[in-house]
Image: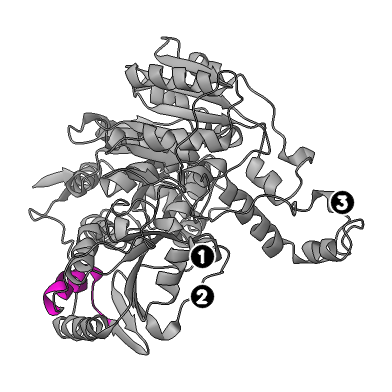
Amino acid sequence: MKLSVGDYLLGRLAELGVRHLFGVPGDYNLWFLEQAERSDRLSFVGCCNELNAAYAADGAARLAGISAMATTYGVGELGAIGGVAGAYAEHVPVVCVVGTPPLHAVEGRALLHHTLADGDFSNMLACYRAFTVAQARIEPANARQEIDRVLRQCWLHKRPVYLQLPSDVAALMIEAPAGPLDLEAGSDPDQIRLAVARIAARLAKARAPAILLDADVGRFGLGELVLKLAEARAIPFATLTTAKGVVDEGHELHLGTYGGAGSRPATRSAIEEADCLLCIGVRFTDMATGLFTHQLRPEAQIHLRAFDAAIGMEHFAGVTAREVLAALPPALPVRSRRPLPASLVAPLAAREPAPVEPGRPLSQLRFWQRMQDFIRPRDVVLADNGTSTGGTMGLRLPAQVSFIMQPIWAAIGYALPALLGTLLAAPKRRQLLFIGDGAFQMTAQELSTILRHGLKPIIFLINNDGYTIERLIYGANSSYNDINPWRYAQAASFFDTQDRALSLSVQSEDELERALALASEASSLVLIELVMDRMDAPGALTQLARKAAEFDFPQLTRTAELDTTKAGPARDLPAKDLPAKDLPTKDLADPVG
């Protein structure tokens, strides 16, 4: 069958499950976007800028399994690269399609706009090579092979890929194969049998086994297999902070969140004293481990990753986590199901709030306690970095809630455009966004696109007068942590001339109750501005901020301990701005209790 190169690419994307192509038009990608306009299998979603398009594609991929974006050469793709790098860091599969100058201009080294005017057309691909698992320039002779190769790598490795599509190539006709994409990962049956036998033997003889989960459990769709394994042997499991929501947090074997020294004592003991700890997709990053305060027994650890396993000094290449997890339960002796001891059960982090007192100013503590009851099963919850993630990390999510955050790349402003992606990927689910005022100002214009498409999330905008997370780390009263105050409750009306939103501003507990009642009944987008004190923050965030300051500025914290009246020797910074020593200390996994 004959197809144009552009239509062939669009067909392969649709075959993978891509339904929306996020991006910004530019002259080099217009023919491809025309082809997308004619497609009945996916649609183009124009964003306000390329960085937001990358965030939107990231958000969509976390729910849909994969997504795609389209930008123009040079100026467009470099605008998106920060978002693509975040997807790479967090194992999110995004297909980046870049419309380039026509092939004859590339080969002739023409001095064109959107380039450096030096005739070099390899520099943009070189930039993306560091943040994608596969790259190609599509040409007539290699179109089928390269498109299929690159898309397969995106699907298998759950990371971004990069395709350059010259403007004069998109319309060229090629012979399209009849068969589907090959998406199977190669594995060695003998290696799988050996790895399963080794892991099963270790688990069977362990007296205190445990399982530790990271975000890849969700990325590679391993959640059900993990639960079957845990239930087959009654093995308790915990999630790293980077993996919140990847499994049912109400499960009887769930220990809660492990984050090193910031963990609940019972959770920390169960994980760090395990004599066999099965780590699935685990990466010991700073945020996942409470700034590297984890103390795990090396001899107890078994690491199972997407395409390999490590047991002590033994390494098993050519095995997939999916196949190993599927084969483990039948290989283990059955152990009777029994609930965890009461001391190990992860409690609700948000305590029962006291009765609402009319006029009492709204606080972080009271707000997050209220959110514990407001979030429903099957909701999609997004949290931007800062007080929003600090608060949501302390909630026990109801069953089947999808939780979206960006804990590794940690870009402020990520969550609002990511919400556009998740709304389009799961339009029938209620979606809640928690975002601070500083983060909102980074990417606020994508609220326009959400309104344009008639989407109806509930947005909680925490107005605490600037970058509170940064203030907690350093410079509590410094001007660089200030932002210009906006009339946030009027943002929706500014971006939408059709008045399709309910906007509210809340300063007290009783006003919050009225706003939540209205939001629950609304049939439109709801934006609730929550006015709070600038230094009010979830307890865990203050503790984490103190540890971050000690990690980032050790010379200053040491100086402050010796003499809090003098500036540190390395930089002339006032000691009064060092992290306060009397801030309340709470578990990282319990920021609102």
What's the CA distance linking mark 2 and mark 3? Answer: 34 Å
Q: As displayed, is residue 556 above or below residue 105?
A: below
- Identity, as a three-letter code, of the amino acid under mark 1: Thr
- The quarter of the displayed image where residue 559 is located: bottom right
Give the number of the mark in front: 2 or 1.
Answer: 2
Indicate which disc residue 289 carries: 1
Which percent across, then down, holds residue 375?
36, 35
The residue beneath circle 3 is 574
Q: Residue furthest bottom?
A: 313
Q: Where is residue 201 in the image (x, y as percent from the top left)?
A: 22, 86
* Neighbourhood count class around disc 1 (C-alpha, 10 Å): few under 14, some 14–19, many 20 upward: many
Tag 2 residue: 295
Q: Chief secondary structure of the magenta span?
A: helix
Q: Nearer the viewer, residue 528 or 35?
A: 528
Which is nearer the N-term, disc 3 or disc 1? 1
Q: Give the range drawn in magenta.
A: 317-331
Q: Distance between the residues labelled 2 and 1?
A: 9 Å
Q: State yes or no: discs 2 and 3 in contact (Cβ < 8 Å).
A: no
Left or right of 584: which side holds 17? left
Foreground residue among 209 and 485: 209
380 lies left or right of 106: left
Q: How far apart are marks 3 and 1 (CA)?
A: 30 Å
Residue at 61% from the left image edge and 41% from the top image edge: 537
Q: Tag 3: residue type?
A: Pro
User: Could you say where residue 38 lies in the image, as x and y percent from the top left?
Assistant: 21, 30
Where residue 161 sits, quadrant-wise, is: bottom left
* Camera-nearest label, 2 or 3: 2
Does 404 appear above or below 42? below
In the image, taking residue 566 as reference, residue 587 lies left or right, namely: left
Q: Is residue 490 above or below residue 39?
A: above
